[in-house]
């Protein structure tokens, strides 16, 4: 029944398959992605373990030598977290990692503050991402300075310099967070609240949670609006098909009534001629 209706109304069939395709795409739509990038050994993997509370076992392996060699993703219910190889350890042609970083919704630029300002290689990499992005980099970039054990005041002038570097690349400074991932993990393992708070990780965790929920809301609203448009098209096509069916029915009824009337007239005439004759 539906099949024959769809073959009679190709526009309705087209609108229905557009709705089907939309729902399929929405289901397979990639989740919000948070990616860590930066020089090798800067503390990217340790930071992601801390942020995602990998306390006993490291989901993202760490080492004091070059460790992460390919991108690795942790799928969480609300978002994905992606670890990447150090910028200076990536092959020149590691286009796949670069493309994934460019597509990520939140970028964590991870830098060991013991090394001073961001170096030229990291700045070039950020500039390359900015060039490929439609929106300004500062909208999705968070700069995370690791190895921040000690008093914040010690790092004030370094933070100002890094702030100026980021401002130069994106036209506006990105938020800067000071953290010690190792102190956080130690605090979690030993149940030491003071270490956890001093690590700076909880502040970054709540900033990220806020960003992720905002991004999800935006995605949901945009998807819901698009779906409304597609559903409205199906509705319009169904209304047109129903109108056309009704018109055809009336047309058939009219011609049937005319035929019946003609048949009645013919038989009345025949009767009259038989009686007269
Ligand atoms: N003191 C201190 N050490 C840290 C911190 N974060 C990471 N480390 C140490 O720094 C070293 C490198 O950390 P990783 O997390 O493996 O660094 P990475 O950026 O993932 O390195 P690659 O995967 O090789 O690019 C490890 O020995 C970590 O224990 C921190 O906040 N403070
Ligand atoms: Mg790593």
Image (cartoon, rainbow, N blue to C red):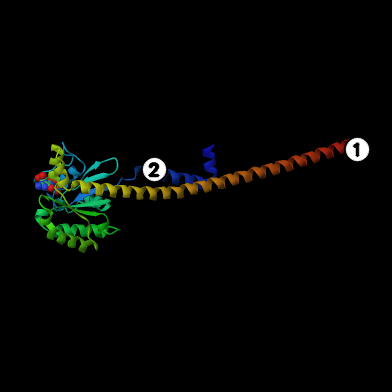
Quarter of the image that includes the C terminus: top right
Residue 153 image-quadrant placement: bottom left
Q: Residue furthest front?
A: 194
In the image, residue 88 above or below residue 253: below
Task: Indicate if the residue with disc 1 has its beta carbon within 8 Å of ligand 2.
Answer: no
Place of residue 2 in the rendered image (x, y in percent of width and height, measured from the top left): 52, 38
- Most foreground residue, 35 or 203: 203
Q: Camera-side residue: 213 or 277?
A: 213
Classify 10 Å Cα crowding around label 1: few (below 14), some (14-19), many (20 and above).
Answer: few
The relative height of residue 203 versus residue 137 in the rendered view (above or below) is above
Whether residue 68 is visible? no
Left or right, residue 106 beside residue 265:
left
Q: What element carries label 1?
A: helix
Of the residues under marks 2 and 1, which one precedes in the sequence? 2
Q: How crowded is mark 2: few (under 14 residues within 10 Å), some or many (20 or more)?
A: few
Badge 2 vs badge 1, beta-carbon distance below 8 Å: no
Residue bearing mark 1:
276
Estimate the x, y position of residue 165 in percent, counting from the top left.
17, 62
Dot 2: what SS?
Answer: helix
Q: Residue at x 87, y 38 (%)?
A: 272
Label 2, label 1: how many angstroms apart (C-alpha)? 76 Å
Residue at 14% x, 60% y: name it.
Answer: 120
Viewer-side label of 2, 1: 2
Image spot of residue 248 (x, y percent)? 63, 44
Residue at 25% x, 51% y: name it: 106
- List the residue tagged with mark 2: 24
- Does residue 8 appear in this view? yes
Is 261 positioned to the left or the right of 144 in the image?
A: right
Mark sitting on residue 135: none
Q: How far across and down, in percent of the image, does residue 150 sit? A: 10, 51
Q: Quadrant of residue 195?
A: top left
**Is 147 left, or right, of 99 in this rendering?**
left
């Amino acid at each position: 029944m539906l099949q024959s209706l769809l073959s009679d109304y190709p526009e309705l069939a087209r609108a229905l398959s557009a709705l089907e395709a939309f729902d399929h795409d929405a289901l397979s739509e990639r989740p919000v992605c948070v990616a860590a990038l930066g020089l090798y050994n800067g503390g990217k993997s340790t930071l992601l373990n801390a942020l995602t509370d990998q306390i006993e076992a490291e989901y993202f392996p760490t080492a004091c030598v070059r460790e992460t060699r390919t991108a690795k993703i942790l799928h969480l219910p609300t978002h994905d977290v992606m670890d990447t190889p150090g910028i200076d350890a990536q092959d020149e042609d590691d286009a796949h990692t670069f493309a994934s970083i460019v597509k990520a919704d939140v970028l964590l630029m991870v830098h060991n503050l013991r090394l001073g300002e961001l170096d030229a290689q990291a700045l070039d990499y950020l500039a390359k991402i900015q060039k490929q992005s439609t929106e300004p980099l500062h909208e999705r970039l968070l700069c995370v300075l690791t190895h921040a054990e000690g008093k914040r005041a010690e790092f004030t002038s370094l933070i100002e310099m890094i702030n100026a570097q980021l401002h130069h690349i994106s036209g506006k400074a990105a938020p800067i967070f000071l953290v010690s991932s190792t102190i956080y993990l130690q605090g979690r393992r030993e149940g030491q609240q003071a270490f956890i708070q001093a690590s700076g990780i909880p502040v970054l965790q709540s900033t990220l949670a806020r960003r992720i929920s905002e991004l999800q809301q935006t995605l949901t609203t945009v998807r819901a609006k698009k779906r409304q448009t597609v559903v409205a098209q199906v509705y319009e096509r169904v209304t047109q098909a129903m109108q056309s069916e009704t018109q055809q029915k009336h047309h058939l009824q009219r011609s049937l009534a005319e035929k019946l009337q003609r048949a009645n007239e013919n038989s009345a005439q025949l009767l009259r001629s038989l009686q007269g004759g």
